[in-house]
Image: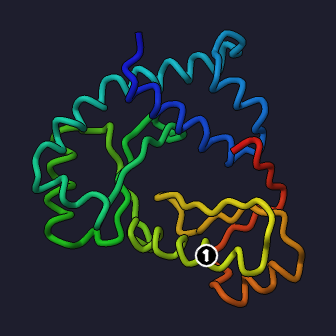
Amino acid sequence: MFKSKVFLSILALSLTAIAANGSATESVALAASNENVPAATSVDYDEVLAFQVRVIPMLEEFFQNKQYAALIPATTDYYFNNDHPEGPKIAFVTKKGNEPKIRNLRKALERKFGTDVVFESSKYTVPELAAYAKKVEKYLPTIYDGPWSVSYSINSPRIFVDANLTSRQIYLLLQKFDADRLNIQLNFHPALT
């Protein structure tokens, strides 16, 4: 029926959308079963599914080239941008867009995918985001003993902290870490993660 990679990619994208729009219970139901999906959502889902079914095998083939695969995620990474105004796209995000290796990668991607690929600039590489998130993860239990989640997204320079923190705990967190790099969400519901 579905290839597992395609279904998991779409499921992961659905879960990302849940965090962004805050309607978790409705979105979880939609991600789990599509029998009650409204017509407008089905069209979007069908378009996203068709796009991913088409491009995922092409991406797998493209990254069999070790020269390009070595750049992921050290200097660049990608995600499926399903909200692009021109329809679904493969979005490549990089901090070092002017480096010769990245310029060569970009040219090769444009040849292979044409208008299906877009390029975005980022303040941080994926390893830099992961290292900063780890620091936040390590510090959070020293000020808070409840359930929490720390995450990051390649298309955002911010670390997402989900916890029911007090104003004092938020103050301590912001004293320790750059406020511009944190996105603190206070309505954390661990049963939904």
Note whether 15 is above or below 35 in the view shown. below
Tell how many labels: 1
Q: State the residue at coordinates (35%, 23%).
A: 53
The image quadrant where one finds the C terminus is: top right
Label 1: which secondary element: helix
Q: State the residue at coordinates (13%, 42%).
A: 64
**Left or right: 126 in relation to 150:** left
The picture places residue 159, in percent across and down from the top left corner, at 59, 68
The picture places residue 117, in percent across and down from the top left corner, at 32, 43
Q: Along the line of sight, which residue is nearer the eye, 11 or 96?
A: 11
Residue projecting furthest to the right: 167
Note whether 18 is above or below 77 in the view shown. above
**Left or right: 109 in relation to 75:** left
Note whether 43 is above or below 26 in the view shown. above
Q: Along the line of sight, which residue is nearer the eye, 73 or 149?
A: 149
Q: State the residue at coordinates (45%, 22%).
A: 49
Note whether 72 is above or below 33 in the view shown. below
Q: State the residue at coordinates (78%, 63%).
A: 163
**Left or right: 132 in relation to 64:** right
Residue 60 location, quadrant:
top left
The picture places residue 114, in percent across and down from the top left corner, at 24, 38
Question: Circle 1 is placed at which residue position?
Answer: 136
Which amino acid type corresponds to the residue marked 1 in the rendered image?
Val
Residue projecting furthest to the bottom: 175
